[in-house]
Amino acid sequence: MTFLLAIETCQLTKTYQGHGGCRDISLAVPSGCIFGLLGPNGAGKSTLVKMLVGLLSPTSGEAKLLGRPIEDVSVRKKVGFLPETFRYHDWLSGEDLLRFHGSLFGMSSRETKARIPEVLHAVGLADQGSKRVGGYSKGMQQRIGLACALLPDPDLLFLDEPTSALDPIGRKEVRDLLASLRDRGKTIFLNSHLLSELETVCDQIAIIKKGQLLFQGDWRELAASGQQVKVVVNGDAPVDMISTPSPSHPAIRLHSQQVLTWDNSGYPLRKEWILTWNGDADVPALVKRMVDNGLSVYEVTPISNSLEELFLQYVSE
Amino acid sequence: MFAIARLTFWESSKKRVFFITFLLSAAFLSLYGLALRMLAQQMVTIIGPNSAQLIVKQILGQQVLGAGLYFASFLLALLALLASVGSIASEIENGLLQAIVSKPIQRREIVLGKFLGYGSLLVAYGIILFAGVISVNLIYNQAALISLTPGRMIFGTLIFIMQPLVLLSVAMVFSTLVKTLPAGITSVMLFGLGVIGGFLEQIGSMVSRTDLMNIGIGISLIMPADALFRKLMSVIATTETNPLASLAAGPFGTAAPPSNAMLFYTLLYILACLSFAIYHFNKKDL
């Protein structure tokens, strides 16, 4: 059964003696996407994830996973979770640990037996399954945790800092794995501090700060909504002439400028302007306008906001 | 629940505390057997009428049997408390439970699974230990077990294995309430309180002080482990027709044996502890 929304929360709140936690979080995470949760330290990200996977009881509000209330534990048969503090029974072998988690998921021993080689292969531990978890490196322990989460072939996967202990190659492998899961229609809810990583894999994001939801949606649309162009020009025409509203450039604004070169008398020659406007950028029309106003154009570079910039913009407001 | 129980049984049998307790038990049974053998040899040398010899044998025999069972109970209590007190608390502290609680299982299954896992290990170990103590006594100290019938033996075994289950249920409660160290300290102190309560009750009975007995009974209601030991002694070592019972009481004997109602109360006590542990764990934020 497929659902339009894999995660749906309505004013979900968790406070500790009236403080901290998160408040009134209303999220809608579409099925089949990689959803990133961002926020500064102490913003309430882990609190939110822990509520959704049943580790914390909400103070108020409601939440549904795969169309069923979070209080219904049976929904977790199709929900995988990798905790931030991944800690497993280190005296077990990797395969024994997976067998144990398979029984917790309610999988038959036949199902578990069939899935174990698949998940071990998926996380890059294909030939390490018979070794004790206690003998694994930190990165391998994180991988076996991911294997546990993947065991029931979940429709929804919660990953709390899933690559914190991995090297760059391991991170790339996990990113590829997440992308392949998304391609198979799985929903991944990713909580990570690594913005560059979220930027690479996430389709949608939510930003929370001090327990409040600031933004949710497609971050690329958000980034594209405020276009910026860096231009390097030579000439006397003031920036006002360029930024005067016109049908092709409804509201160009000068974001910043700096002089790059001066003549012998100290008169500015080459300048760099960062121009911004709302709506679709018509860069060729902008170039024509600058040329028509007698400017020599040396460089025109459209700038997209990175996720990091958007994030900083939100959390510093 | 059974997956948790299996893993708990497996894990606890691998714990160092179990290995140490096992070694201690082996050492205890060997030394105890040696002491009983030497005592038996010494008894033969007692000169006097047959009846006097029998009285001395029975008094000493009762006390040695009591000491053996008391120390065996203590070992079992030690294992029950030390192995299980961190069962939930330590796994909350180190984050191990996060990957388990998030699975499609009810939290009560975790508490009951752990109880079942530790409980079955303690029961198995308890039966072996009890059988060991009784066997050594049957070889060298038969006089102390003249009233032991197969029925009493089974009844005694059941009482003996109830002791660690009581302590286990208490440890489970504290393990869901507080962190590992305070849970351990509190459980051990409660066990100690039960022992003191048991002694107060026996002393009160010997000196006919009802108030002292009532204090002891009150404490036994808070922690019935020692009352179970007194009941065990009354089942294994004496009968109502044995006039030597009061003479042989000593520190490990039973001047005032608890009634069968105490056993029923103990079962309710275990159930209440488990219910409370489940209730509290259900509400606990991890």
Image: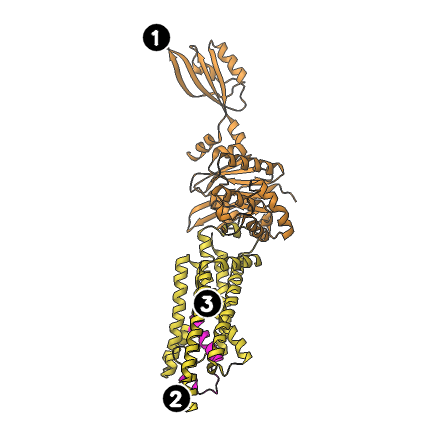
Nearer the N terminus, badge 2 or badge 3?
3
- Residue at (43, 35) in percent of width and height: A315
Up-down relation of residue A148 to residue B208 (above or below): above
Q: Amino acid at mark 1?
A: Asn
Q: Which of the numbered marks, if any, corresponds to residue B26?
A: 3
Q: Mark 2: few, some, or many residues within 10 Å (few <14, many ≥20)? A: few
Looking at the image, what colour scheme do you see? by chain
Q: Nearer the viewer, residue A198 or B28?
A: B28
| Helix, strand or loop under label 2 | loop
Q: Is residue A104 left or right of residue B65?
A: right
Magenta stretch in the rendered image: B220-247
Q: Which chain is yellow?
A: B
Residue farthest bottom in this picture: B49
Q: Are marks 2 and 1 on the same chain?
A: no
For marks 1 and 3, give the one nearer the viewer: 3
Q: Quadrant of residue A9?
A: top right
Report the chain holding disc 2.
B
Q: Amino acid at mark 2?
A: Ile
Q: Nearer the viewer, residue B72 or B184?
A: B72
Q: Are marks 2 and 1 in contact (CB under 8 Å)?
A: no
Q: Which chain is orange?
A: A
Q: Mark 1: few, some, or many residues within 10 Å (few <14, many ≥20)? A: few
Report the chain holding disc 3.
B
Q: Which of the numbered marks, if any, corresponds to residue B47?
A: 2
Q: Could you tell me residue A301's position as x and y percent?
A: 49, 19
The reply to whether the magenta stretch includes residue B236 is yes
Q: Which of the numbered marks, if any, corresponds to residue A264?
A: 1
Q: Could you tell me residue B242's position as x and y percent?
A: 46, 86
Q: Could you tell me residue A209's position as x and y percent?
A: 44, 39
